Structures are given as C-alpha cells and as structure tokens.
Image (spheres, rainbow, N blue to C red):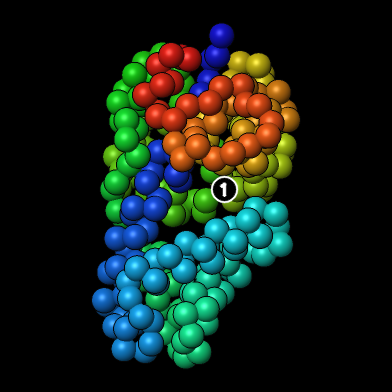
Amino acid sequence: MYKHIFFDLDHTLWDHHYNSKIALGEVFELFQLQEIGIPSIEQFYHKFNEVNHKLWLDYERSKISQAELRHIRFRQVFSQLGVNNHDSCDQVSDTYLDISPKKPHLLPYTKEILDYLSPKYPLHIITNGFNEIQDVKMNSGGIKHYFKHIITSQNSGHKKPDPEIFHYALEQVGAKPRECLMIGDTFYTDVLGAMQVGIDAVFFNPNDQRHVERPTYEIKHLSELKKIL
C-alpha cells in the first residue's frame, strides 16, 4: 500500500535525550560550571531540557530563528539556575553543538527496523533540525546510508507541521500522499502535519503521551512497525 516511508530523526531514531545528557555532562565538566554557581549536572540537564523544549516550540512556530535559538538557549539556562554571568554562554553553546551530534546512541530497535524496511521501501528523513547537525547525527549513529532523501527545514524552506515541507518532500521523492507513511514522535508536528496533507502517519509514543485526535497508527516500540509494514 505504501511506496515511501518518511521518518523523523530526533527522539524517533536518534536518541536525543541520552546523547544530549552525555554531551551536557562533558560541557559541565569542561567549563567547570559548578564553580560559577550551577549546582549540579542533573540540574543543568533538566533545566536545559525545559528551556530547549520551549525554544524549539517557538522555532517551529517561526517565533524565533535558528540563530536566536542558539544565542539565547544557554543564557536562559544560566539565568534560570541563578547565574547572571553569561560570558561563557557562546562558547558553551558552540561546544555543545560540536559534541552532542557526534554521540552515536539510537533508540531501541532503530537499526533492526531500518534493516527490515530498507529492502522493501525507499526510506527518507523529514526533520526540523539543521542540515549540518542532522548529517553529523546520522553519520555518528551509522544510519545515514539507509535514507534516499534528507528533507530539513533548511533545504525545504519550511518547518513541520507546515504543509509545504511535506509537499516539498513529496516532490523530492516523486510520490502522492496516499503512497507515503510518516513516522514520528511529536503528535503536533509529525503526525498532524503529515495527516493534514493526506499522508498516513504513525505516532511513535513510547511514553504514552495523551492526545485527543486519532493517528493512522500508534506504536510504543519501533519493532511494532513490522505489524504495519
């Protein structure tokens, strides 16, 4: 029934939380952040996740740019942890962006399901991430070779859930909406974004997020894709 499969990358295949946690721990030690008043690695990590989540929502809704996200992210983390000295924030940001994408950890069953699907379907990525960063992540995780097209918010000029990024993806692969399936972990951007243009969607929901609208399919483990495809 499907001729092309689209995947989101972060939190769907590449384990953003785990890789980010390792990278932030390295940044914490490298810049000796405890000495300037940041209490612990755990608090640094949790505050980063909180701030980063909100800023990414703003980025996806075009309220801030990529450059603004990168500039203010660690400044907000520092301020909310009671540190008003922002002299090292740009260095911290650059170092984090250099270290984090190089971490190789994938979510469970990622390679198994890609090995299963790749002989049967052309596989593609649709991501709101930045070109150079996503490329490093896929190479670090050893999965780039599985994908025919990498559609990003930069090369398409649009961000999920904007219908235009999905139309751009369809043009790139030469397919109709009903011939495609989108798999992602974010209900608003991945699932509703795809379904609004007529692409069936799998909501990858390992943490049992609550939602009102019904996706085409819902799974807790990537291995469950074998029941669908």
Q: Answer left or right for 210 relative to 48.
A: right
Query: Measured from the top left, where is residue 127 in percent x and y?
Result: 54, 43
Residue under the point 49% across and 33% down? 204
Q: Is residue 30 above or below residue 123?
A: below
Residue 186 vs residue 157, the one in the foreground: 186
Number of marks in the rendered image: 1
Under circle 1, the secondary element is: loop
Specify the amino acid type for callout 1: Asn
Q: Residue 53 location, x and y as percent? A: 55, 58
Question: Picture coordinates of residue 19 (x, y %)?
Answer: 33, 54
- Whether residue 151 is visible, yes or no, is no
At 44% from the left and 49% from the top, the residue drawn is 134
Residue to which mark 1 is pinned:
128
Q: Residue at x 56, y 22 (%)?
A: 217
User: In the drawing, does residue 180 fall left or right of residue 164?
Assistant: left
The one of 192 and 161 positioned closer to us in this rendering: 192
Closer-to-camera residue (47/32): 47
Q: Front-most of 195 and 171?
A: 195
Q: Residue at x 65, y 31 (%)?
A: 194
Instruction: Identify whether 172 is placed above or below 63.
Output: above
The quadrant of the image that shows the N terminus is: top right
